[in-house]
Image: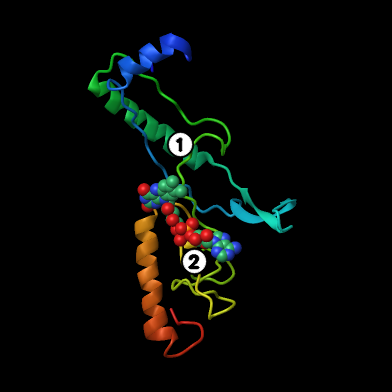
Amino acid sequence: MPAGTPRWGSGWKKAAARYYNRSINIRAHGAVQSYRGNYLDLDPTYRDAYGLPLLRMTFDFRDNEYKMSDFLTGKCQEIAKAIGPAKMNVNRRTGKYNIVPYQSTHNTGGVVMGKDPATSAVNRYLQSWDVPNVFAIGASAFPQNGGYNPTGTVGALTYWALDAIKNRYLKRPGLIDA
Ligand SMILES: Cc1cc2nc3c(=O)[nH]c(=O)nc-3n(C[C@H](O)[C@H](O)[C@H](O)COP(=O)(O)OP(=O)(O)OC[C@H]3O[C@@H](n4cnc5c(N)ncnc54)[C@H](O)[C@@H]3O)c2cc1C
């Protein structure tokens, strides 16, 4: 709703009814690179009902993400202007990453796949480098979030891993060669 719209009471209700079918949001999604300083670990302080440590997320945006966001917001602004709106609000991304505003629910990573056991948990077949009879299937394998819906890729990775289990691992148990 336009700036200055009352945020409660009958003024808000009137504005909500007027603008519900007369407004649109234009959003842009970006990807965050897989920085070494962004990671998940076990929380040293907080525990669950069973006394087990909770998962702790250490994460923030860097210059690249702010610049990309700025660029995309500018493009969205151009698109919105071309539509010729009566009013327009632009929300630029500023400040540190904050879990409170809605961020989409595409949580990925934690058991990342890679070529090197020193920097990844599973190989390209989602097979644990350390324990070859363990395959970790899911969005946990993503080294970074591509900024787009993850489920298609999770499905493709699942078929890929199952094919390797059936046609390679079961015939010759152990680490599957690249
Ligand atoms: C509201 C919402 C809307 C979404 N919309 C979309 C969309 O439109 N498009 C899209 O592509 N993606 C969407 N996603 C994201 C998508 O659902 C997830 O990325 C996807 O489900 C991840 O799959 P996964 O197998 O990695 O994890 P999950 O589906 O979360 O599976 C993890 C499993 O592990 C189990 N588990 C956890 N801890 C333990 C434990 N200690 N022991 C045993 N089991 C355990 C959990 O019960 C769960 O079954 C949405 C997500 C949400 C929440």
Give the residue at mark 1.
Answer: 67
Of circles 2 and 1, which is in front?
2
Kindly identify the residue that appears in the image at 52 percent across and 57 percent down.
109
Which corner quadrant holds the N terminus? top left
Which corner quadrant holds the C terminus? bottom left
**Relative to the observer, which residue lies in front, 9 or 109?**
9
Q: How many marks?
A: 2
Judging from the image, what secondary structure is the residue with disc 1 in? Answer: helix
Is residue 147 visible in this depiction of the protein? Answer: no
**Residue 176 numbered mark, or none:** none
Give the residue at mark 2.
Answer: 113
**Circle 1 crowding by C-alpha within 10 Å: few under 14, some 14–19, many from 20:** few
**Relative to the observer, which residue lies in front, 128 or 10?**
10
Kindly identify the residue that appears in the image at 65 percent across and 56 percent down.
41
**Circle 2 crowding by C-alpha within 10 Å: few under 14, some 14–19, many from 20:** many
Is residue 73 visible in this depiction of the protein? Answer: yes
Relative side of 46 to 83, left or right: right
* In the depicted structure, whether residue 174 falls above or below residue 55: below
Kindly identify the residue that appears in the image at 37 percent across and 17 percent down.
16
Judging from the image, what secondary structure is the residue with disc 2 in? Answer: loop
- x and y, in percent, of residue 82 in the image: 24, 23
